Image (cartoon, grey):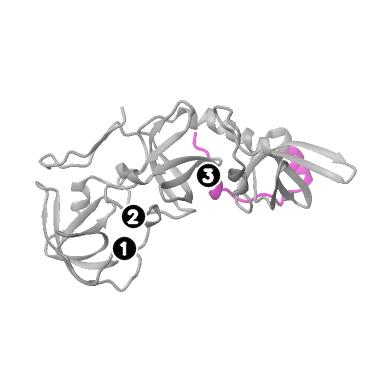
Amino acid sequence: MEYLREPNMELTENIDMEKIQTAAKTKDIICAKPLVYEKGVGLHFNLCGYKAIMPVKETAYTPDGSDIKEAAIITRVNKNVCFTVKDIKSTDTGTVIYLSRKEIQRIAYKEYISKLRPGDVIPCCVTHVDSFGVFCDIGCGITALMPIDFMSVSRINSPSDRFYAGQNIYACVKSVDNAGRIVLTHKELLGTWLENARLFKPQSVTTGIVRSIEDYGVFIELMPNLAGLAESCDGIKNGDVVNVYIKSILPDKMKVKLVIISKAETSMPSKNIKYFISDGHIDFWRYSTDSGIKNIYTDFT
């Protein structure tokens, strides 16, 4: 069973009290944006005019029972948060509704996330981009890290070169530690060297991104899992989008030889991703060609 990611959930805070009371009995999932975080208390919501509070201890589920970091709670303000209604109380100042995200996440972890194994391909949503990787919502706000080295075969300077917050992507489970934390990988879904090279033809012109400038040439990304080498060219820098002529494609050496023609008019290419795999399970993935000098692979078993 797959659980929706919080950024993809429909906001349902404008339900009436009758539906709120029903949700308290049925434990239906509601999604709303917290208005403010109060230190030591929790997240405050407005559910159809009623005051609602999500206590700190109910803001997240941790499989190992570790404490919830305050920074993780603060970042949820004005963002989609899913929860169930835990209790409804009448006070001197009016009705207060108590919410629990922890319970929804506990169920999602038990029924879905705890069953994930290395090699499983899953949908997820990027929630935060950092210098070392991106965090992805894999279900009901439970996040997993995708380190920068696992994003593509083609090297990038920053995860922001590849992803942005709110982006829906696919990823593969790389590992699961003893605390139940999941690490994701992405490059295995982007095709082998040969699969990518077949998208291009020698003696043709295409567009690429300058990824590395070395003394012996310039590496240009044609696809996230395919780069070619061109001779040095004045006036270009890392990140530039350039038009290139494909001189040759050499499967035996896993090389694409390029010639830089000019800078492209566009400053940044689309971050739409071409997936060669988007579901199922992978036991073993080999990027290299049979005759390639380098043997690049991932063994999930």
88 vs 256, left or right, is right
Mark 2 burial class by Cα count in 10 Å: few <14, some 14-19, many 20+ = some
Give the label, 3 or 2, closer to the camera.
2
Choose the circle earlier in sequence order: 3 or 2: 3
User: Residue at point 19% right, 66% down?
Assistant: 244
Image quarter of the C terminus: top left
Q: What stretch is highlighted in magenta?
A: 1-22
Real-space CA distance between mark 1 and mark 2, rounded to the nearest whole angstrom: 9 Å
Q: Residue 285, percent across and down?
A: 26, 36
User: Residue at point 10% right, 41% down?
Assistant: 291
Q: Residue 75, percent across and down?
A: 59, 49
Return the residue at label 2.
Answer: 157
Viewer-nearest residue: 151 or 236:
236
Element type at mark 1: loop
Element type at mark 3: loop
Q: Residue 194, percent across and down?
A: 18, 47
Give the residue type at disc 1.
Gly
Real-space CA distance between mark 3 and mark 2, rounded to the nearest whole angstrom: 28 Å
Return the residue at label 3.
Answer: 5
77 vs 186, left or right, is right
Give the residue type at disc 3.
Arg
User: Residue at point 20% right, 47% down?
Assistant: 193
C-beta proximity under 8 Å, tags 3 and 2: no
Residue 239 badge: 1
> Is residue 16 magenta-colored?
yes
Q: Is residue 41 above or below residue 78?
A: above
249 vs 26, left or right, is left
Q: In which quarter of the image is residue 162?
A: bottom left
> Is residue 106 magenta-colored?
no
Q: Is residue 210 above or below residue 165?
A: below
Viewer-nearest residue: 224 or 64:
64
